[in-house]
Amino acid sequence: MIAILAIAAYLAAGLVITLRLFRNQEGSKLPRVLGLGLGFIGVVLHAIPHYQNLLSASGINMGIFNALSLIAWTITLLLLISSLSKPVENLGIVIMPIAAIAIFLESRYQTVHFLTDQLSSGLTIHILVSMLAYSLFTLASVQAVLLAIQDHHLRQRHPGGFIRALPPLQTMESLLFEMIAVGFVLLSLALLSGFAFLENMFEQHLAHKTVLSIIAWVVFGTLLWGRYRFGWRGQKALIWTLSGFVVLMLAYFGSKVVIELILG
């Protein structure tokens, strides 16, 4: 029941944000705080069943749908907190429905992949920093797509519709590269903590994760260098951002899909 309420709150929040963005007759009268408030309600409700599914006597269950739900919850929380001080709530058009789908999958399909309940503090830090890095790069990817759409409309001299409701292009670009820069720092810390606290990072299903994470780190590092050195923006920034995001998601979810869903 709580999961259903969380899904409803997320979908309602996404709807309110969409109506406000597209300036429909109904949406123009909806206050900004309504969408954020519904989002925070969804985050609180989401945490209750997720906590019950995540923790058990056997340890922490990081099955693929539990992991997806945890990342979706983290992404949504980061988005809402950031929206209190920055104009990024429009990303909720994509993020809120994804969070609702994550809750449904976690509630409907049970997958099991237990971590020991006696994690070291270093390994706990590694997991938390990795989750934050994944979450920020997810937000950056959605921001990059929205920025590319905005840039295309402005170049075609069609600034009407929802484009008019977005922040200025320069602000959107600054927010994108702020997300990427912070995510890059977190990913760097995640890799360093992984080498420091994980034994045999290149063994036991960790080799591909390590290699793909390093490739993603190189991609995002190159993007930041290109932005600083050559002023990369627009389509080039979109391609590099999405490429790094896909590689990073494959590093974590690719193996879980094969091991837990296909082989399992």
Image: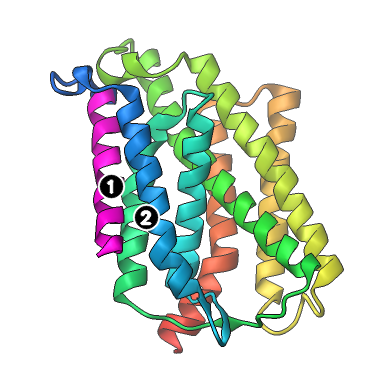
In the displayed structure, would residue 171 be above or below residue 226?
above
Callout 1 crowding tier (Cα within 10 Å): few <14, some 14–19, many ≥20 = many
Question: For numbered disc 1, what is the local secondary structure?
Answer: helix
Q: In the visual, does 138 lie left or right of 43?
A: right
Q: Residue at x 46, y 89 (%)?
A: 263
For the residue marked with disc 1, what is the amino acid?
A: Ala
Q: Residue at x 34, y 24 (%)?
A: 32
**Closer to the camera, 233 or 53?**
53
**Closer to the camera, 250 or 117?**
117
Q: Residue at x 35, y 26 (%)?
A: 33
In the displayed structure, would residue 3 be above or below residue 78?
below
In the displayed structure, would residue 212 be above or below residue 233?
below
Mark 1 or mark 2: whose residue is earlier in sequence:
1
The span shown in magenta is: 1-20
Q: Quadrant of the N terminus?
A: bottom left
**Closer to the camera, 130 or 10?**
10
Question: For numbered disc 2, what is the local secondary structure?
Answer: helix
Q: In the visual, does 258 lie left or right of 15?
A: right
In the displayed structure, would residue 216 be above or below residue 19?
below
Q: Main secondary structure of the magenta part?
A: helix
Q: In the visual, does 249 lie left or right of 37?
A: right
Q: Which residue carries the number 1 mark?
A: 9
- Whether residue 209 is visible to the viewer of this picture, yes or no, is yes
Q: Are marks 1 and 2 in contact (CB under 8 Å)?
A: yes
